[in-house]
Amino acid sequence: MGISSERIDLHHFHHPANKTIFAALFELWSHQKPVDLITLTQSLADKGKLDGVGGPAALAELQFFVPTATNVEAYLDTLCEKRAARQLLELSKEIEEEAKQPKADLPALIERATSGLKRIQSGKASRLPPLDDMSSLLGANLPPTPPELVKGMLHQGSKLIIGGTSKGRKTFSLMDLGISVATGSEWWGCETTKGKACYINFEIQRPFFARRYADICKGKGVIPDSGMFQCWTLRGLVDGIEKMAEDIIKRLLEHDFRLIIFDPIYKALGNRDENKAGDVASMLNELEAIAVKTGAAIAFGAHYSKGNQAGKDSMDRIGGSGVFARDPDAILTMTPHTLEEHFTIDATLRNFAPQAPFVVKWEWPLFHRDEAINPADLKQPKKQEHSSSSGQYQADFSPDEIVEVLLNAGNGRKPSELLRHMKEQSGMSPATFWRLWKKAKATPYLAERQGRFWHVNNLTK
């Protein structure tokens, strides 16, 4: 229903029964109720409108007439074209009747016909929605908001990002989110609305993903019903999200997913550079198109920049381009707490009221909300040895951090670009960089080509 509500309304249907059915389906969807034959039939019966649409038999026939949502775009195109044809016939009749009048105002009539044709042509040829006259969207006409998937945090059709430290168990958190939605159970102390979830797994081998799934289900004490939580393992098959989007959308439209999780997101970059705003924005636009066309919420994780993050604003902790921290509708950051295995969660929300930070505690294989802990007690960096009076802090750096940057940079980097990146993202000094750069170059993971250095995994792309 998500993509349908974006492109069509009651006026696209000619037959009164079809208008009634569409209105009932949209009402069920907007109130987070199941959109299926049984619920639709009961809803129409309760309103006394079931006989007016032909009864249960007519509804059942419609279900078999359109057996899959895979071709929903083509169906919507047909509806738009049929509506345009009806509008053209109506305009022709109006112009014909007025042109027959003895004192017809021909210049005004020609102008009316021209503007009418432009309006019809725009509605038929363009996939962009019409302008909203906001004065007509007040009171009872206020459009319904999409269903809430995670109470107070995430709507269907929106995007959510979880930012955290490297190896900070973001995958466990995302799997927990998917299982929570699939079972309608709480996630990090927040209520969820039960719906189908799909986990698009770019990294973990199927046997290990299955074991994590079993561990999380056991830890939560839930098991999703058949078909409610599905995993699509694409490890080794990722070649940039823009090259896969069409196939992904076709497969996803075969199901009524409420939540789609991409993990890890950097694998969807392809040859893009995660530190370039334009590259990241184009990738996130692809994800947004998937959200619009499927009507599902999109969730993914992103890593923090290197170094301690306690002194930064929560939105500035996520590494790579700042677009990662501006584009999503819900941004959740997981920052290490002073207590071991505790993390402070900061939520930056576009469409919800602000939420106070809270703390989650890691107890294999889940994070649990801990209301008794002060979220402001973030873990601070250690002071430099032998210089406690200076008040300066020293982050622990290694050559691996430089190698990791090149792993996520599909276009390679010059040493000067790497120096600037490490300084901006982690506070690494030039002296430290050049010392570690000598060691990084000596590893078997880097290769040079025309003055730029690449991770060997990227040379074959």
Image: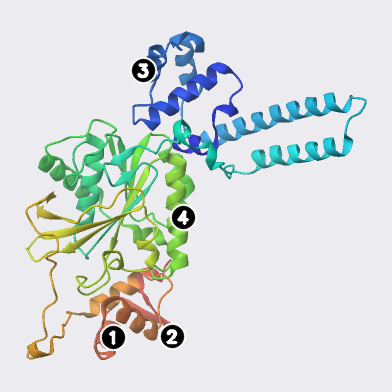
Say which residue label 3 marks: 38
Say which residue label 1 marks: 437
| Amino acid type of the residue tagged 2 in the rendering | Gly
Residue at the (10%, 43%) spot, across then down: 219
Residue at the (32%, 48%) spot, across then down: 352
Say which residue label 4 marks: 285
Q: Earlier in the sequence, mark 3 or mark 2?
A: 3
- Separation (CA) of disc 3 from disc 2: 65 Å
Q: Earlier in the sequence, mark 4 or mark 1?
A: 4
- Separation (CA) of disc 2 from disc 1: 15 Å
Residue 23, position as x, y percentages in the image? 48, 24
Instruction: Between label 4 and label 1, give the one nearer the viewer.
Output: 4
- Separation (CA) of disc 4 from disc 1: 35 Å
- Separation (CA) of disc 3 from disc 1: 64 Å
For the residues bearing labels 3 and 2, Cβ distance under 8 angstroms: no
Residue 411, position as x, y percentages in the image? 43, 73
Quadrant in which the C terminus is drawn: bottom left
Residue 356 placement: quadrant = bottom left
